[in-house]
Image (spheres, rainbow, N blue to C red):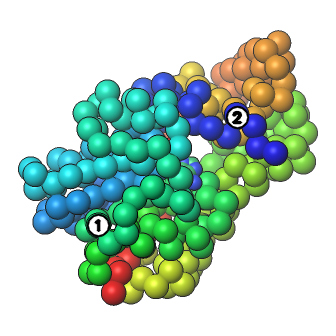
Amino acid sequence: MTENWASYDSAADCHERLAGPSFFERPARDLVADIDVSEAARIVDIGTGSGVAALVASTSAPPHAIIMGVDPSIEMLRTARSHGLRHVAVGSAPGLPLVGRSFDRVLANFVLSHLSSYELGLLDMVRLLYPGGRLGVTAWGSIHNEYREFWESLAESFVGQDQLAAATREGIPWDEWFSDPGHLDQAFQEAGLTTVGVRRVVYRIRATIADFLAIRENTLQGRFIRHYLGDAGWERFKQTTAAEFHRRFTDPIDHDRDVFIAIGTRP
Ligand SMILES: C[S@@+](CC[C@H](N)C(=O)[O-])C[C@H]1O[C@@H](n2cnc3c(N)ncnc32)[C@H](O)[C@@H]1O
């Protein structure tokens, strides 16, 4: 049974301050450019989080466009509203609390991996589109990331490899699956979308060790480790990772992350 660690409520502050600007915003800009919102009157961002993609869309959409964000996390939505996203709703895919055939564009920036059933979730997103409307999503690729791997090896030494893998499977069951662009393409076709295009972009990310660790501590895995270890164990884990990172790497750290951007049209 998934407990509170799977919710993004406790990560909202970090997402707004650190993860959003350094990891999510540039892909969101490319997603919005690829899907073209310049003539869209109604746009919805599913799993909007702190509103990153929705707010990017608001800068290129017509002035009177209605832009909405949906997310299961109330704290994330509170943050999105504080940044000026006026229309927000609590909800999850599948089961989105919105009327079908009422949007020109549906966005989901790094969300598909979280869905218990990506097939049903995608059908639910496609349902929202007018015929001719477009769905655009992003997913992380699988480029080698020595910093993340090192952090995970330290995490495994605290909670066990099997426990960490089980938590990852529970919280982001499709993370690895969608790091293959063929799976994104196939999922879009199976959801009935046409003229599907998938492209890969690599982003160079610079972060201080402190920020990198804060971001990892607020990921799904970080939230699980905190829940699993309790307060004292969590403090030991944070001290150990900070010491080991400073011993091993030069601060700040640079690394590449690859992202797949997929766009499809509802016939
Ligand atoms: C990695 S964050 C990305 C947030 C945002 N899209 C961005 O680009 O900054 C994933 C978001 O998906 C939301 N989420 C998780 N499961 C979801 C579901 N089944 N349906 C919709 N959103 C979901 C989370 O609450 C979280 O805000």
Q: Residue at x 36, y 47 (%)?
A: 69
Residue sitting at x 61%, y 54%: 114
Q: CA distance from mark 2 to mark 1?
A: 33 Å
**Is disc 1 placed on a helix, strand or loop?**
loop
Disc assigned to residue 102: 1
Q: Amino acid at mark 2?
A: Trp
**Percent position of residue 3, x then y:** 75, 37
Residue type, numbered disc 1: Ser
Instruction: Please state which of residues 124 and 252 is positioned toward the viewer in this rendering.
Output: 124
Report which quarter residue 9 is drawn in. Answer: top right
241 to 67, vertically: above or below: above
Name the quarter where the C terminus is drawn.
bottom left
Which of discs 2 and 1 lies nearer the camera? The answer is 1
As drawn, 117 above or below 72:
below
Image position of 170 with respect to 131: above or below: above
Residue 237 in sight from this viewpoint: yes
Front-lying residue, 129 or 185? 129
Tell me: 162 left or right of 212: right
Q: 266 left or right of 10?
A: left
Q: Which residue is mark 2?
A: 5
Q: Position of residue 146 (x, y in %)?
A: 66, 45
Look at 78% across and 20% down and name the residue there.
234
Which residue is more in the foreground, 131 or 198? 131
Q: Residues within 10 Å of mark 2 (few under 14, many from 20)?
A: many
Q: Tell me if I can see residue 48 in this picture.
A: no
Mark 1 and mark 2 in contact (Cβ < 8 Å)? no
